[in-house]
Amino acid sequence: MADEASRPFAGLSEVSIPEDVPVEGDISVPVGPSRRDDEFSTLDEPVKETVLRDLRAVGTKFVHVLYPKRSSALLRDWDLWGPLLLCVTLALLLQGGAADSDDQGGPQFAEVFVIVWFGSIIITLNSKLLGGTISFFQSLCVLGYCIMPLTVAMVVCRIVLIGGSGTVSFAVRLVVVTASFGWSTFASTAFLADSQPPNRKALVVYPVFLFYFVIGWMILTFSPSQ
């Protein structure tokens, strides 16, 4: 008994394997191409198609801002190309004012850029500190895209100012800027509402109100240089 315990595998030498039983084979696991990777891979995509696809995505987000509703489209497929384009356009349109030429503190390009992006970051941090579930860049995306109505208002104001800067011109600009300000605030809150705690939504909306109010005030008080 002790002799068998010292040689546990001694009987294996007497085991015979029939000749018709295979003792080797292929154990590799075939891995087919992932359909998801093939669908979303852009490594072999032409640059033109990539640019057009991104432009279509930006255009789709502009449509969502024009017709705001409680949707996750801006949050799910966020990007910063649209906000960057709107910020640059707004900063360029605010150049050449009378305040710039008279050294009265008119908004320069860098100042507009800092106000838009710094304000968006502050609102985003406020939202996160209040318990919001939205990510940092998703919030920047929503706030940036919702500047579009105010950018359109700036274009309209520049056209109106071509005919002069009288009382009628100011009244038209006031109506346009007020409507655009309300639209921007409403659109941004429509996208951000579901990501905030129900009892703290007012604390989130108030900074958004101030943010778009400052931008609207810069547009309304703009006057072209003579």
Image (tube, grey):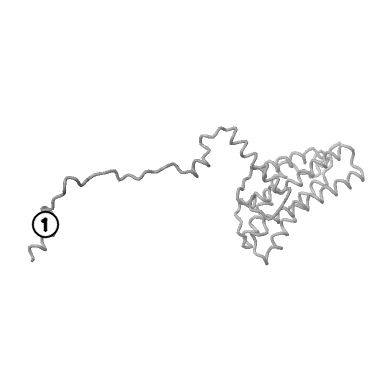
The type of residue carrying mark 1 is Gly
Report x, y in % for residue 173. 85, 46
- Name the residue at 75% across, 56% down: 209
Q: Residue furthest front?
A: 20
Position of residue 26 in the picture relative to residue 225 (left or right): left
38 or 213: nearer the viewer: 38
Image position of 60 with respect to 135: above or below: above
Q: Rate crowding at label 1 as few (under 14), some (14 to 19) or many (20 or more) other CA atoms within 10 Å.
A: few
109 or 131: nearer the viewer: 131
In the rendered picture of this protein, how many numbered marks are placed on residues?
1
Report x, y in % for residue 211. 73, 53
- Name the residue at 8% across, 65% down: 2
Report x, y in % for residue 8. 13, 60
- Name the residue at 32% across, 44% down: 28
Report x, y in % for residue 161. 86, 40
Q: Which structural element holds mark 1?
A: helix
Which quarter of the rendered picture does the C terminus lie within? top right
Q: Residue furthest right?
A: 167
Image position of 54 with respect to 72: above or below: above
Return the residue at label 1.
Answer: 11
Which quarter of the rendered picture does the N terminus lie within? bottom left
- Name the residue at 11% across, 63% down: 5
